[in-house]
Structure formats: structure tokens, C-alpha cells
Amino acid sequence: MRIFSGIQPTGRKHLGNFIGAIVQYVEGQQRAADAGDVAIFCVVDLHAMTVPWQPAEMRERVYDTAAILLAAGLDPEKCIFIRQSDVPEHTELTWTLGAVTAHGDLNRMHQFKEKSAKQKELVSADLFTYPVLMAADVLAYRANEVPVGDDQRQHVELMRDVAIRFNERFGDTLVVPELKIPAVGARIMDLQDPTSKMSTTGGSTEGTVYVLDDAKTVEKKFKRAVTDSDDPPRIAKDQSKPGVSNLIDILAAARGITPDEAIASLADARGYGDLKMATANAVNEMLEPVRTRYAEIRQDEDALEEIFAAGATKARAITREVMADVRAATGVGPRTRVPAS
Ligand code: TYM
């Protein structure tokens, strides 16, 4: 059972990334190791080139993200931890998979529609083919499982279709991966606008809780979270109560309990203030150790580069073989074996 997931490089990783993805990564690295396989986690710097970026900041943001993941509990001895651009098979496979990806399917991607609408100067070809690179990330390892938040569902479905189409056309070469979405917290919402997902680009700063926010800031953001005007206040999950439902999910995910258990723990609450404080405290308890370890790990960029170099060596032992099979199946490149006469 092999796991692969990727995350964009930014120091502003938020609670949605943490609960929707990073918590699953840490659980997955152990589960893969217990099953005698491996989990691969990737800081996707090439995906960050699909929208305008500052060259001077790119490497810094990669270090920031790597330090957050390591502080959260990824262990480069237990998993394979890589920077995407260090493993060239990802980009080579992207080109090959482009041959079995329908232009119309890429045109239907919600994320492409959203992001392209925001570009003022140029909608790049890379933004359009973003999901093909994402498919290559996973398929280059023959990974079985892709832990992500709900917003990546469509991209994972596309990579499954691409793998199936490749295998139909060229013979059974790639593994069709499964989507893995957390039971609670697959879609953490903005605290100020609980009908929109928490996000690095779209939402408000006040409504977005960053992993690296200090404890006071986290508390302030939760205290100001939008709830509803039900009188008396009702701590329950309900479509008509997006703000309260979001707080319940965050509380449950941060404590590692179910939403029903989170609701039961607030049976004596006097109002939404108690729900907000309980959630802020649970989030701070979850993030405090991460923030402390982050500060240490982030200082040593040489050590981070060494971790990436070791990760790339382990990764390429897998991706070179997969790429050799892909080249053989597609008839691209030199003969790999002298045919028996
Ligand atoms: P990225 O960097 O935008 O987000 C990283 C992970 O965080 C999840 N996430 C959320 N989960 C719950 N609630 C939210 N509000 C929320 N916001 C973000 C995302 O679903 C994601 O799992 N394209 C990917 C990166 C990627 C990748 C891959 C993922 C590149 N290659 C291969 C899996 C496999 C992305 O931009 O994630």
C-alpha cells in the first residue's frame, strides 16, 4: 500500500491544509511503513510556477513548507520526503500523460476556471496542464492512495481516468490510485465566510487561521468567527448553520474525536462563545508543538537541503523504473533490451 501526496510551497499553510491533508500524511506515513511499503510526500514547487511567482522567494517558501511538514511529524527516515523539481521523472511523465489526457477534461476543472479568472496578465499553459503534472506526481510511484482535502477530488478523479486510459492504450503499466478524504475536516471553511473554503488566496486574513499564527491571534480569529443568530443558540451540525458546523468540525478534528462527541462535550455551554473558546484552545494545543519545532527546523536550510537530496535518491529508485516501463510501453527512446534472436 503506497501513498503519495503533494502540497504547494507557501509559509502560509492554514488550518484547512493542516486538518484536511497534513494530519492524514502523518497517519499515512506510519500506515504505509506498517504495511511494508512507503509514503511519499512532495513539496510541489513546479506547481507553484503555474501562477506568477517571485523567483527570489520560491526557495524560501519551499523551506517554509518543508519545515512545517517536518514539524508536524513527517519523518524522512520513515517516508520519502521530496521537492518536486528534484525528481525529473515527474516532468517527463507529465508529457507522456498529456498524450492520453483530453483537452476537454482539463477545460472542465473547477480549479482551472477559478484560477484562470483571477489572472490579469497571462493564463499560462502550465495552469491548464496543472492536473497532468499532478497525475504524473502520483502515477510515477504507482501509488495506491492519495490523501487530500475535498477541493482536490476532481484532480484525483482525472488522474484515475488518465491512468486507466494509459493502461488501455499501452498495456497494464500504471496503478489507478484511490482518493482518500478525511472523515472530518475535508473542507474547512473560512471563519468569516463559512460558505467559502479556507484558502491561501481566496479568503480573508481574519477568517484564515495559519499554522504559524501565534496563540493569541488564533484565539482572536476564533472569537470573531461568524456563527448565526439562532435564539437560543444551538450547537449542532446543520446545512443552515455553516459557521457553527465548521467550528464543530474543527473542534472534532483538532481533538481527534467525532463531531457528535464534540457536540456532547459542549452540553453545558452557555452559547457560541464557549464553542469558539473550546475550538481555539483545541487548535492551539494541536499547533503549539508544531510552531515550536518549526522555529528550530526552519533555521537550518543546509539540513533541509540534505533531507531533500536523500529523498530524491530514494524517490528516483522508484520513478526511474516506472519511467523505463512507460518508455518501453510507449515505444519512446532507445531499445532497453536487445531482443532475443
Ligand atoms: P494545496 O497546496 O492547495 O493544498 C494542500 C492540501 O490541503 C488541502 N486543503 C484543504 N483541506 C480541507 N479544507 C480546506 N479548506 C483545504 N484547503 C486545502 C488540499 O486538498 C490539499 O490536499 N494540487 C495540490 C498539490 C498537489 C498534489 C499532488 C496533491 C500536487 N501534486 C499529487 C496530491 C497528489 C494543491 O495545490 O494542494
Image: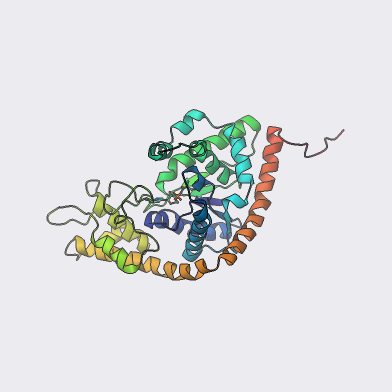
Residue placed most toward the observer, 164 or 206: 206
Task: Tell me the quarter of the image containing the C terminus.
Answer: top right
Taking the view exactly as shown, the residue that stands out farthest to the left is 231
Q: Is residue 294 visible?
A: yes
Q: Residue at x 27, y 65 (%)?
A: 278
* Direction from residue 294 to residue 79 in the image, left or right: right
| Residue 114, quarter of picture | top left
Q: Position of residue 268 (x, y in %)?
A: 19, 66
Q: Position of residue 37 (x, y in %)?
A: 60, 55
Q: Is residue 318 above or below residue 154?
A: below
Disc tally is 0
Q: Residue at x 57, y 47 (%)?
A: 143
Q: Residue at x 60, y 59 (%)?
A: 308
Q: Position of residue 226 (x, y in %)?
A: 23, 54
* Direction from residue 312 to residue 292 in the image, left or right: left
Q: Is residue 264 visible?
A: no
| Residue 36, quarter of picture | bottom right
Q: Position of residue 161 (x, y in %)?
A: 52, 35
* Direction from residue 163 to residue 118 in the image, left or right: left
